[in-house]
Image (cartoon, rainbow, N blue to C red):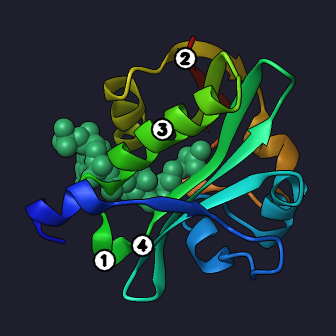
């Protein structure tokens, strides 16, 4: 993607009849079963390039004030070019338009790159979901040689 194309990025809501882009969502979550626990009750926003979905994020309402990005993913061929940062800003805009006052996002305690991205986008540490990964996934998940256990939740006030 060229720098001049960045200004033209535009996400769209994935229609209910369209297939769920599991291949993208699996970049950010371990299993289809885990994705299916939230995706059916969520709104999916996608980014297309040349007729192909190259990025997506999933918004799940926790209550009438708070909405969570349950999944955010950029096709590996397009990572590191500012699309993740753009998607976070897009999610803030859409959440604000829909009247939410806080946007949350969670990631593994070991996910240094993701934590840096979310902090730069204005999210602050909010809570820890203890034993989230050990309680919700059948097999141990190991990243960077570290077994995942707790999920770190970050929050951004949007109003
Ligand atoms: N190494 C370290 N930090 C990086 C890297 C990298 N290779 N790439 C991006 N970052 C960080 C940097 O802080 C960067 O800021 P900078 O531009 O000031 O250096 C920041 O992220 C923004 O980078 P983007 O290019 O906007 O990020 P990208 O388009 O790659 O999207 C994402 C980030 C969504 C994490 C993407 O890499 C991805 O899909 N990864 C696999 C799936 C995943 O881990 N999703 C998040 C899981 S948590 C959840 O879904 C709720």
Q: Residues within 10 Å of mark 3 (few under 14, many from 20)?
A: some
Q: Residues within 10 Å of mark 4 (few under 14, many from 20)?
A: some
Which of pointers 2 and 4 lies earlier in the amino acid sequence?
4
| CB within 8 Å, label 4 to label 1 | yes
Q: Nearer the viewer, residue 15 or 58?
A: 15
- Residue annotated with mark 1: 77
Q: Which mark is residue 75?
A: 4
Q: Is residue 24 left or right of residue 80?
A: right
Distance, label 3 to label 2, CA atoms, is: 26 Å
Q: Residue at x 10, y 62 (%)?
A: 4
Q: Nearer the viewer, residue 159 or 132?
A: 159
Q: Residue 123 at x, y = what percent?
A: 46, 21
Q: Is residue 133 left or right of residue 148?
A: right
- Disc 1 element: helix
Q: Residue at x 78, y 32 (%)?
A: 131
**Split into 4 quadrants, where in the image is the N terminus?**
bottom left
Q: Is residue 51 left or right of residue 24?
A: left
| CB within 8 Å, label 3 to label 2 | no
User: Is residue 81 visible in this depiction of the protein?
Assistant: no
Callout in the foreground (4, 3) = 4
Q: Residue 49 at x, y = what percent?
A: 37, 80
Farthest left residue?
Answer: 3
Q: Nearer the viewer, residue 159 or 81?
A: 159
User: Is residue 58 visible in this depiction of the protein?
Assistant: yes
**Split into 4 quadrants, where in the image is the C terminus?**
top right
Q: Is residue 1 left or right of residue 32?
A: left
Q: Residue at x 68, y 59 (%)?
A: 44
Callout in the foreground (3, 2) = 2
- Residue annotated with mark 3: 110
Residue 50 vertical position relative to residue 81 in the rendered view, above or below: below
């Amino acid at each position: 993607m060229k720098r001049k194309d960045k200004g033209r990025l535009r996400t769209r809501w994935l229609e209910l009849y369209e297939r769920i882009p599991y291949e993208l969502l699996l970049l950010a979550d371990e299993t289809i079963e885990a994705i299916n626990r939230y995706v059916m009750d969520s709104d999916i926003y996608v980014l297309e390039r040349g007729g192909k979905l190259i990025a997506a994020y999933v918004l799940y309402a926790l209550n009438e004030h708070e909405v969570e990005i349950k999944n955010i993913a950029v096709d590996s061929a397009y990572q590191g070019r500012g699309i993740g940062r753009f998607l976070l800003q897009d999610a803030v805009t859409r959440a604000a338009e829909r009247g939410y006052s806080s946007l949350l996002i969670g990631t593994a305690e070991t996910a240094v790159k993701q934590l840096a991205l979310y902090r730069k986008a204005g999210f602050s540490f909010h809570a820890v979901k203890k034993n989230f990964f050990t309680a919700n996934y059948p097999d141990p998940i190991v990243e960077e040689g570290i077994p995942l256990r707790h999920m770190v939740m970050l929050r951004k006030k949007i109003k």
